[in-house]
Image (cartoon, rainbow, N blue to C red):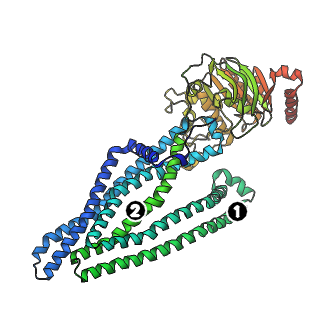
Amino acid sequence: MKQKKKDANLMSTRQLIRRCFGLVFRYGCGRYLTISAITLLTAAFAIANLYVTEYFFDRVGTMIGGGTFAGLLVPMLVYFGFLAVNRLVPDLIGNYSWRLLHEIERRLFRLVNAKASRLPPVLYEQKSFQDEMEKARYGAGQGIVWYVEIFRYFLCYNLPICLAMSWYLFNLKPILVITVALIFLPVFLTEIMQAKLHARKEEAVAPLRRKMEYYENCLTRKEHFKEVRLLGATRFFRKRYQDVQTDFIAEEWKVVRKEKIVEFLSRVITLLGYGGVLWLLIDALVAGEIGVGAFAAVFTALRDFFDNMDSLVWDLTRGLSQSAGKASNTLRFLDYEEEHGEPQKPQNGEIVLENVSFAYPDREENAVDSVSLTIREGETVAIVGENGAGKSTLVRLLTGLYPPSTGKVTVGGVDTAVADPGGIRKHFSAVFQQYGKYKFNLRENIAIGSGDLDDTHGNAEAACEKAGIDLSSEAYPNGIETNLAKEFGGVDLSGGQWQRVAIARGLYRQHDIILLDEPTAAIDPLEESRLYESFAEISKGKTSVLVTHRLGSARIADRIVVMEKGKITEVGSHDELIAKNGTYAEMFAAQAEWYR
């Protein structure tokens, strides 16, 4: 499915500003404007502090020339009052803005997650989409929020102070402004060069970083450690990790070394310029061009001014460019076309596939090829075939999770291509081979798909009984309330026990049609047989689709569909297909040998 999305390189600065500010203001407009106003006021106090400092030291000079200490009392109080405001208020604003920014970040994360839940499931088959989603989550905070924050702080604090300080210096001695500009020209160029070097570094080290994370997971993650320890592969993965880490450090150092050399030369030039400004100030003071107060004001404010200029240059070059790229990733993700359709309600549990084909993104061959099949209401159909035959893909098509490339799928007379997908899926329940192991208690694990996590009707226990979960066993010390996360003080279930939990989850959800896609792979054949016999009783009157490799279990179905290379090659009951002596009969005879 092609998606309508805007390329980040084509998004103008005006569009980026409009959309980023719009999103941030949506979640904190009033408070954000309040912070901006206070920041402007703080900048005004910092600017006024120049004149207050000049006034204070001029009065000190007057006192030395014969004035009284009493005449210095008011200037001293004013001076220390402004000093306190300039030292304390920024910290208070910083704490408040930090809290607000993180709250906006959390809301943007929720926005991205909500967007992901409304996108077509077939997108998750694309590696590029997985990368886009990861970058969108990262860009919500590090991109959109900080892009707006850099603009806000630049406009409300850095820029007013730098302009006011430049005007102040110009009035004292015009050459001071020119000197400052010449000092920060190399700083500006340095930031541009470092931004380019940083981009090259990320391009070089990103693949190595992913490899390091993978090898680290193989050494430390729960799902890997048993096999790694038992097979003695720890040394292998440690060696791989160390080799990649060495390459990572070497690649990073190539760029860091250049960055540090450029930064060092820039700092040397800035330091020489700083000394030059001080020399000009002293020369102007000795020549009587400026007073002691002006000299003291500039001398005390010069370092803060340099820091502000440094911050301003960084914001304009590296900060904005980096956050703009990250913000564009999030905005591009938010532009993905969502699932949509007409609100139509299926009239029954019949499923019809008419000449349906489907190919996964970036693949030319069809996973399902020209399939036509009718599953009648209340019928149990088993889908069998070798690995890669297209069974699971067919299940995703008949549920409407994936749209067919060609052909038509209807559920209860409703075309899945035009109907609201959410409305279609309300009629389904499913147990997939790759099921979720949620770190909640047993009741919540079962009720999670129904919207009734509190299980107000107490149906979770009934679902456990149907799925063969013995709540009185030692495996569930707290019964239905047993926590299923060992790392959070709960219990650790076996694969077969988890599979029963997944089956109970599927049975708990209200449904007209239920799908079981290899749900018993971790359960022994005898227990599987009992479970399917129970399932046959439970599903009477409801449409059921069963995907399985164990053909003995398929005998409970009214009809069996045999798939080979994406096509349906045989359809019939167990006895009919055995009598036909085709692919199904051959597969059944081969599996029967396992139990002799």
Q: Give the residue at x 40% y 54%.
A: 151
Q: Secondary structure at mark 2?
A: helix
Image vertical order of residue 61 relative to residue 360, above or below? below
The answer to whether 433 appears left or right of 289 in the picture is right
Image vertical order of residue 191 relative to residue 134, above or below? below
- What residue is pinned by disc 2? 312
Q: Is residue 429 visible?
A: yes
For disc 2, the neighbor class at 10 Å (few under 14, some 14 to 19, many from 20) is: many
- What residue is pinned by disc 1? 240
Image vertical order of residue 171 relative to residue 532, above or below? below
Mark 2–mark 1 contact, CB under 8 Å? no
The residues tagged by marks 2 and 1 sit, at their Cα atoms, a distance apart of 43 Å
Which of the two labelled residues, at mark 2 and mark 1, occupies the earlier sequence position?
A: 1
Q: Is residue 469 visible?
A: no
Q: Position of residue 577 (x, y in %)?
A: 84, 22
Q: Quadrant of residue 246?
A: bottom right
Q: Position of residue 25 (x, y in %)?
A: 38, 44
Image vertical order of residue 491 relative to residue 559, above or below? below
Screen quadrant of the N terminus: top right
Q: Nearer the viewer, residue 123 or 241?
A: 123
